[in-house]
Amino acid sequence: MLMPAYNGERYLREAIDSVLAQTFSDFELVIVDDRSSDQTFSIAQSYAAKDHRIRLERNNHNLGLVNNWNRCVDLAKGEWIKFVFQDDLLTPDCLEKMIAAVTGEDLMVVCKRDLLFEDVDEQYKLSLIKYIEKHSIEVIVPGITRLSAADICRIAIEYMGKNFIGEPTVVMLHRNVFRQFGRFNPDFIQICDLEYWLRVGVNTGLVYVPEKLATFRVHSSATTLNNKINRRYRYNYLDNLLLQYQFVFYPAFQPIRVAAARRRPPCNLLNILGATANNAYDFALREAAQSENADKGSLRTWESLIVKSPKLERAMRKDKLKNNILRLMQWFNLRS
């Protein structure tokens, strides 16, 4: 099991205790501290000194959230890789039941999650509960415990950008997944987990265990809330845009493109990407026009994205052309 850690002293003991309480005891817990400035490392040291199953590592410098996930993966030695975050919890039978669900060539296992709210306002709490009520496996495909690659392609198109699989603490992956599909993409700040689940799932499918075996803790210092408040442009616009860009251009998402083309009517992923890109660019321009520092903020972030995504402007031009044609047709209809 892997536990990336950074300034997590508040909940770290509970998270580690939930791992050590597993009924399936043949595991190694790798804790990778990303240069915490609080007591995270010393707390982890105290646990590692008492239990030989814990291996503690500390990065030479702060890698950031997603790169620390990848560092954890690089250090993993087991056949199966299971994340548990520093503020989340596992039920004692989590590993036992997830491993028992594996048969044959399965590469990804997902369980249902519970939620634990602390220090968050009621509006955000209700919005997250409502989100999960609409965008979870047990809601979208009730009664199903195995989703084929085709199932995941269909859901990914119909619920584009929605994390219907869940957070890393609810997912277990065979180590071959990382050999075949690479590592987590640090260009994402919020749906880095969803992008990876889909990158794998549209090719392999997944096994679903419909029991609450993991608890996702939602609190005021969590990454999701910080991103929503402090990185609003990337949170609201660019992560979904990057995911759509991968759907259209990345080799691993070829099954998505095939599924989209076979829909009736077909789903034009390039048009969707173009519309999303133009909306994101328009927002950056509007924000820059209202700012004294037009070369900073969202527009600067947009420009760095274009450098990394050279085919994006092609989709934007196509969307603009389509909109111009529609406007011409509307004009002619009004004149006739």
Image (spheres, helix red, strand yellow):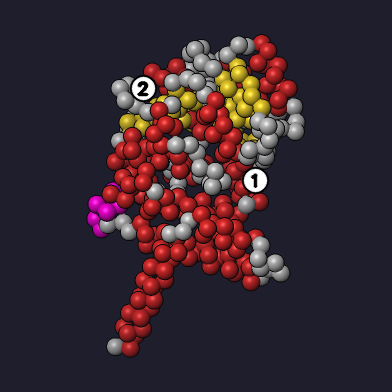
* Residue 294 image offset from top left, x and y in percent: 66, 68
| Identity of the residue furthest to the bottom in this view | 335
| Identity of the residue furthest to the right in this view | 38
Q: Relative to 194, does residue 234 appear above or below in the rendering?
A: below
Residue at numbered disc 2:
102
Res 73 seen here:
yes
Q: Does residue 24 appear to the left or right of 29 in the view shown?
A: left
In the picture, the quarter occupied by the C terminus is bottom left
Res 237 seen here:
no
At 50% across and 39% down in the image, what residue appears? Answer: 184
The disc, 1 or 2, on the residue closer to the chain's N-terminal end is 2
* Residue 44 image offset from top left, x and y in percent: 68, 21
- The stretch of residues the image draws in magenta is 259-265
Residue type at tag 1: Asn
Q: Relative to 219, does residue 298 appear above or below in the rendering?
A: below
At 65% across and 46% down in the image, what residue appears? Answer: 226
At 51% across and 59% down in the image, what residue appears? Answer: 306
Residue type at tag 2: Val
Residue at numbered disc 1:
226
Label 1 neighbourhood size at 10 Å, few (<14), some (14-19), many (20+)? few
* Residue 135 image offset from top left, x and y in percent: 43, 43
Q: Secondary structure at mark 2?
A: loop
How many numbered marks have been drawn onto this rendered protein structure? 2
Label 2 neighbourhood size at 10 Å, few (<14), some (14-19), many (20+)? some
| 261 drawn magenta | yes
